Structures are given as structure tokens and as C-alpha cells.
């Protein structure tokens, strides 16, 4: 599956637009990670535990979007975008969305 944030794919032409596809996940912070993050906040620097959690969340959301596109018969997704929003004080949603298309080499 080809995935791109642009509306075109070099070397391919879009032969069919299949519709909007999306994937999301909601993750809550972990108390143990919060304690480590609080300590890290005192001295500064990257909070690696949260960086890892957000990266895993993005990958899970992408996997779900790809599965949705595959159900529609797509072999590519264009105009891919991410969005993050807080659901509650300790949980955030990662949403990825794009347009499922069928492409063929030019």
C-alpha cells in the first residue's frame, strides 16, 4: 500500500477514488510513566516514555487506516493527515485519515 501526504504519486496515476479512510486509537497515560515523566520534567529533556507511546499509537492508527482502505479495494492512500485530541485528562486520540485510491503505473 502506497501512503503519502501529497495528492499525487510520482510515476502513478489515480484511476479511481474510493473514499475517505481513517484509523484511530485512544491511549491513556500509565501511572508509572507519569512518575518518570514528572521527574524528567524537573530536569528537562525528552520524555522518552511518551515519545514511544505516541509513536506506537500513530503506527496502530496507520495500520487501521490501511485495513480500512484494503476493504475498499485501494492500493494507495493520498492526502494523509494526522490529528491528535484529548479525550480526557489522561487520554488522547490519534486519528489518521486520507483518501483511498486505486493507482496504476503511468
Image: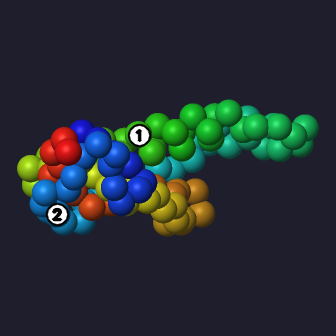
> What residue is drawn where x is 12% and y is 60%?
16
First along the sequence among labels 1 and 2: 2
Q: Residue furthest front?
A: 106
Location of mark 1 (residue): 59
Location of mark 2 (residue): 17
Q: Is residue 28 visible?
A: yes
- Does residue 31 sit above or below 14 in this rendering? above
The N terminus, quarter of image: top left
- Does residue 2 sit above or below 97 in this rendering? above
22 on left or right of 17:
right
Q: Is residue 64 visible?
A: no
68 on left or right of 79:
left
> What residue is drawn where x is 45% and y is 44%?
57
**Camera-side residue: 38 or 19?**
19
Element under disc 2: strand
56 on left or right of 7:
right
Residue 13 percent across, percent down from the top left? 22, 52
> What residue is drawn where x is 57% and y is 47%?
29
- Does residue 5 sit above or below 60 in this rendering? below
Quarter residue 100 falls in: bottom left
Tell me the mark number nearer the camera, choosing from 1 and 2: 2
Quarter residue 48 falls in: top right
Residue 31 percent across, percent down from the top left? 62, 42
Residue 18 percent across, percent down from the top left? 14, 62
Amino acid at each position: 500500500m502506497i501512503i503519502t501526504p501529497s495528492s499525487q504519486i510520482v510515476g502513478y496515476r489515480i484511476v479511481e477514488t474510493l473514499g475517505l479512510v481513517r484509523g484511530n486509537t485512544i491511549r491513556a497515560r500509565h501511572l508509572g510513566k507519569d512518575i518518570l515523566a514528572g521527574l524528567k520534567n524537573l530536569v528537562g529533556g525528552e520524555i522518552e516514555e511518551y515519545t514511544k507511546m505516541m509513536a506506537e499509537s500513530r503506527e496502530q492508527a496507520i495500520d487501521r487506516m490501511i485495513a480500512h482502505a484494503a476493504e475498499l479495494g485501494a492500493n494507495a492512500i493520498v492526502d494523509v493527515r494526522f490529528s491528535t485530541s484529548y479525550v480526557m485528562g489522561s487520554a488522547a486520540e490519534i486519528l489518521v485519515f486520507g483518501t483511498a485510491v486505486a493507482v496504476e503505473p503511468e
